[in-house]
Amino acid sequence: MNLRRSAILREMGLTPLWRLRNSAGTVDAAIDVNASSSEEAPEPDESSQSAHPSAPASRVAEMDWQELEETIHACRACVLCEKRTQAVPGVGDRQARWMFIGEGPGAEEDRRGEPFVGQAGRLLDHMLTALGLKRGEDVYIANAVKCRPPLNRTPEAAETAACAPFLDRQIALIRPRLLIALGRPAAQVLLGREISIGAARGKRFERDGMPVIVTYHPAYLLRNPLDKGKAWEDLCFARRLVEEGG
Ligand code: SF4
């Protein structure tokens, strides 16, 4: 790790406890497992909601980026449209090798129209820095649902199902070398089945010929900083997969 990156990581609250070795055997970066944050846990589900009857058309699978993003912004296919400020399609390099997928926009994301820009987003940025990556360069970030669930509750199955064609199309357009699911809801959407993060960590899954790994959502890590070490292990595993071509 060069001095400049070391200084950046220290400034961001990351100290070199876990070190990543690249294929040449040199240390690249590290992440602090003890950093803490005051981010609050998501509020409990406030109500049980059902999906709006008008689901996205199957022709989403044929859309280019412009039409896809316009369609997402105009979408009213589930009840999450009702309280959003705006839909949050995703951000980043459309030729990225790395694609990170979270659960849904939070309050800050809903205001700004970009995923992972609150406290959890800052931790994700730290994780990218520790990997030698940068938001927008070789990285694309999206969520399983594009509109903010009220009170940051977990999206319901009907909502993730209604939004799935958009994520499917983003993945198909990017064809990343690796998909990283951040948290259980994203993992379940990507893999199409119930999953436990604890049991799935460290395993290579596959979706349409692309490798998928799962790790903790940054918001969870802010509430459970002792698990940052496990997340760092997952990122080291991810990097090995990308370097080895998946
Ligand atoms: S969450 Fe997805 S399906 Fe629901 S309204 Fe927003 S864009 Fe449409």
Image (spheres, rainbow, N blue to C red):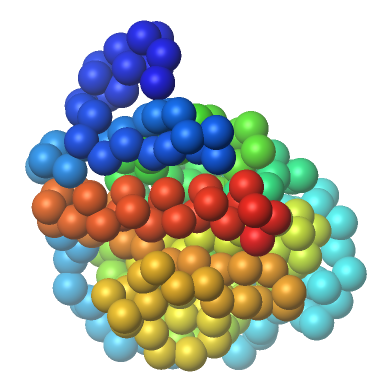
Considering every residue shown, the one lying at the far top of the view is 3
Q: How many marks?
A: 0
Image location of residue 180, percent across then percent down: 51, 60
Q: Residue at x 40, y 29 (%)?
A: 27
Quadrant of the image for the C terminus?
Answer: bottom right
Q: Residue at x 40, y 68 (%)?
A: 202
> Where, by quadrant of the figure, is residue 161 drawn?
bottom right
Residue 49 in sight from this viewpoint? yes
Q: Is residue 115 left or right of residue 57?
A: left
Residue 78, compared with residue 240, is above or below; it is below
Nearer to me, 162 or 212: 212
Residue 169, compared with residue 110, is above or below; it is below
> Where, by quadrant of the figure, is residue 14 drawn?
top left
Residue 86 in sight from this viewpoint? no
Image location of residue 189, percent across then percent down: 52, 78
Residue 1, compared with residue 147, is above or below; it is above
> Where, by quadrant of the figure, is residue 203 drawn?
bottom left
Nearer to me, 175 or 211: 211
Quadrant of the image for the N terminus?
Answer: top left
Nearer to me, 171 or 56: 171
Q: Residue at x 30, y 12 (%)?
A: 7
Image location of residue 76, percent across then percent down: 60, 71
Considering every residue shown, the one lying at the far front of the view is 25
Image location of residue 65, percent across then percent down: 80, 52
Q: Is residue 233 left or right of residue 25?
A: left
Q: Residue at x 53, y 52 (%)?
A: 240
